[in-house]
Amino acid sequence: MPRVWYSDQKVITMIKFAVCDDEPLMLRELADQITDYMTSSSRAGCSVSRFPSGRALLESGGSFDVIFLDIRMEQPDGMETAQLLRQRGENSLLIFVTVLKERVFDAFQTEAYDYLLKPLNKACFDRTMGRVLRSLAKRGAKGIVIQRGTGCEVVPFSDIVYCEVLGRKIYIHKNDGTTTDFYDRLENLERRVDGRFFKCHRSYLVNLDCVRGCQTGQVMLPRGEAIPVSRLRERELTQALLRHMKEGDA
């Protein structure tokens, strides 16, 4: 039987970056600046993957913590690439890097984390990277450790979309589409997770970071999934979402 415990330590030790730009010089410059910043300012390791087009990024199948995206590229352009990433459930921090000032408002539709203008300003870039590291630390500050025999699996809270109880098992549905299960009660899990989780139904615990809406008794999730919300909890869910968004902006 798997054993589960909860870790207050950071579980992100390697941060995965992707840079997507059809200009080879900018692709190299961005990758170099990320590596230099991480080397001088962070204890975490990093990997930087380069992609010359949105199509190459989408077809890579990779999962990244942070993606720097040019907007003005051949189809799909950066904005379309971002929309496709969100549609398939990617929860990466998206940062647009572009000469197109007028597209800044469009970026909000893809839940962009930031918007940098070319040519890159080092002070602005460093400020964005500082915010990125703080956000990732907050995302990855806690997790669930599930032990099976001599091995174990660490599931950061940030990887969890929702938890579901079926019989005596809890099933953790993750943002990469996989599922992990273990024996426990939802009440025990609820006491040990942090404020990003909300019990929307007696059998479901949802990550508020992943909620895309609520309608007709259902919570809408990034991959088009829907889980039930109890009628008596709908108003509390809305209030919890508003509080969570304000805390995230603080």
Image: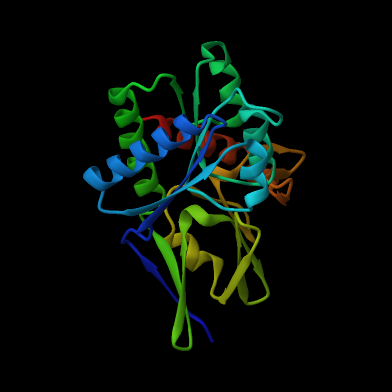
Q: Position of residue 76 (x, y in %)?
A: 70, 31
Residue appearing at x 33%, y 58% in the figure? 10
Q: Position of residue 173 (x, y in %)?
A: 62, 61
Residue appearing at x 51%, y 65% in the figure? 187
- Viewer-proximal residue among 132 and 185: 132
Q: Would residue 247 appear left or right of 37 to someone viewing this image?
A: right
Q: Would residue 23 appear left or right of 227 to someone viewing this image?
A: left
Measured along the vertical axis of the image, is residue 178 above or below residue 68? below
Q: How was this image coloured?
A: rainbow
Give the position of the C terminus as an image quadrant.
top left
- Viewer-proximal residue among 55 and 137: 55
Give the position of the N terminus as an image quadrant.
bottom right
Q: Position of residue 22 (x, y in %)?
A: 57, 31
Q: Residue furthest left?
A: 40
Q: Residue furthest front?
A: 24
Q: Position of residue 243 (x, y in %)?
A: 46, 34
Write down the quadrant of residue 193 in the picture: bottom left
Q: Residue furthest top?
A: 102
- Viewer-proximal residue among 230 and 38: 38
Q: Would residue 37 appear left or right of 236 to someone viewing this image?
A: left
Residue appearing at x 39%, y 67% in the figure? 6
Number of marks in picture: 0
Q: Would residue 43 appear left or right of 194 to someone viewing this image?
A: left
